[in-house]
């Protein structure tokens, strides 16, 4: 009886979501059939053209076009050929990278950026969940475009408005799927996102992925033996994504200007404390999303032997930085005039946060903003404060 009640509640919740989210059940049905069609394929050869466009301030800031030929033996066993000169072979737990120039070589990686590798996968053209409906979905419906004869064109619109931290406002966001009416295979997906930062800067992000199935496919004829011969000589396991070369080493001392006092300050002033350094800059949206978390951590551990220090790595206008911090109520110490620190700490992306123990050793590094950052870093801080 209990299981029947649970099943009934699940059905009612599902029906309520369909109604609240304005979902065309026929369009959703086509997406699910296409997803299942892809999932059934054990071996598929295709060509994918990936266009990545990022527009900000009214102009194209970045536009990249990459082409990959793929021979996919199920989801976890794939060969990608790029520009006919390099290849990525992905097994369940290893990435092999082959290149012809300047010398023929293969390197094997035990850990890698799976997001970058999998964006060329036809299995991910429709996303990773056959349910499609998420908390962000506002509607799913057919697009009646006349130019799309032979295809089901389905739009998934997402909710708009401010995020939880108030650091950006989504203006328009959707994914447009193109499904072949004959084969039910997905042949194209177009992701569009337009948003405005809390500094009133608008940004547009476009991911355009298109699949075709040419008769001649370099990935089908690639000599796989190359991975068995050369790779034995050049195996190169790498560290996890969130690590960098200085992990476990003493944090390099540096001198910068304290934004509030306008006086020179040294990292060595915090010797004996657990320190969380946050490297950021004003136009970095993920940086601004992380800062409310850092403010909460600073307040939470205010009576402990701990300090959060913001390190602005590129902005020059002291007044502009201070106005932003005042407007948002961020009160933890901030350093600027720190362009030299970027090379000192081998910083490649932002925000980067570095946790330093009482001995001055770097015990953790994290790149970017994630929803679980606060929970994870709090445990690490607690652990270091006990030592």
Image (cartoon, rainbow, N blue to C red):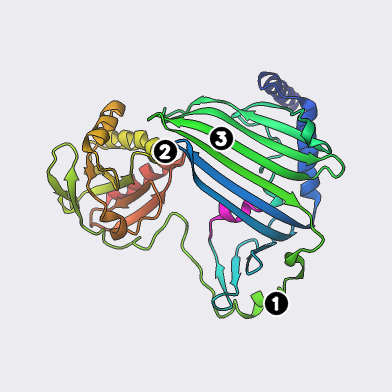
Q: Is residue 2 left or right of residue 172?
A: right
The first of marks 1 and 3 along the sequence is 3
Q: Residue at x 54, y 39 (%)?
A: 205
| Residue to which mark 1 is pinned | 225
Q: Position of residue 70 (x, y in %)?
A: 71, 60
**Residue on which disc 3 sits:** 193
Farthest residue toward the front?
Answer: 59
x, y percentage for residue 302? 23, 36
Q: Residue 119 magenta-drawn?
A: yes
Residue numbers of the magenta segment = 112-120
As drawn, is 281 to the left or to the right of 70?
left
Give the quarter of the image for residue 262: top left
Closer to viewer: mark 2 or mark 1: 2
Q: Earlier in the sequence, mark 2 or mark 1?
A: 1
Disc with the residue nearer the chain's start (3 vs 2):
3
Residue 383 within the segment the image draws in magenta? no
Res 330 seen here: no
User: Cα distance, mark 1 to mark 3?
Assistant: 42 Å
Secondary structure, mark 2, is helix
Residue indicated by mark 2: 285
């Amino acid at each position: 009886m209990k299981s029947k009640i649970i099943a009934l509640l699940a059905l009612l919740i599902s029906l309520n979501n369909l109604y609240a989210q304005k979902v065309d059940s026929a369009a959703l049905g086509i997406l699910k059939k296409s997803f299942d069609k892809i999932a059934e394929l054990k071996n598929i050869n295709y060509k994918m053209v990936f266009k990545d466009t990022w527009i900000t301030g009214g102009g194209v800031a970045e536009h990249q076009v990459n082409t990959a030929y793929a021979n996919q033996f199920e989801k976890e066993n794939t060969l990608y050929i790029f520009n006919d000169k390099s290849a990525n072979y992905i097994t369940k737990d290893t990435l092999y990278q082959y290149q012809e120039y300047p010398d023929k070589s293969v390197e094997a990686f035990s850990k890698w950026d799976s997001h970058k590798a999998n964006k060329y996968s036809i299995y991910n053209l429709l996303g990773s969940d056959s349910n499609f409906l998420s908390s962000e979905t506002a509607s799913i419906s057919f697009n009646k475009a006349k130019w799309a004869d032979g295809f089901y064109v389905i739009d998934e619109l997402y909710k708009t408005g401010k995020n939880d931290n108030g650091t950006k406002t989504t203006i328009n966001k959707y994914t447009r799927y193109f499904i072949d009416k004959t084969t039910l295979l997905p042949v194209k997906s177009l992701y569009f996102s337009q948003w405005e930062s809390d500094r009133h800067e608008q940004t547009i992000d476009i991911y355009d992925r298109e699949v075709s199935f040419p008769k001649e496919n370099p990935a089908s004829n690639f000599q796989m033996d190359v991975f068995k011969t050369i790779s034995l000589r050049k195996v190169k396991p790498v560290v996890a994504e969130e690590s960098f070369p200085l992990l476990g080493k003493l944090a390099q001392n540096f001198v910068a200007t304290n934004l509030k006092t306008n006086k020179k300050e040294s990292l060595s002033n915090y010797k004996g404390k657990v320190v969380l350094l946050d490297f950021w800059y004003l136009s970095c949206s993920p940086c601004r999303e992380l800062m409310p978390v850092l403010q909460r951590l600073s307040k939470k551990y205010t009576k402990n032997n701990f300090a959060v220090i913001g390190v602005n790595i590129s902005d020059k206008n002291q007044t502009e930085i201070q106005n932003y911090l005042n407007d948002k109520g961020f009160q933890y110490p901030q350093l600027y005039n720190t362009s030299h620190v970027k090379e000192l700490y081998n910083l490649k992306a932002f925000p980067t946060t570095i946790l330093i123990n009482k001995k001055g050793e770097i015990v953790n590094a994290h790149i970017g903003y994630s929803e679980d950052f606060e929970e994870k870093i709090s445990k690490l801080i607690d652990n270091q404060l006990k030592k």
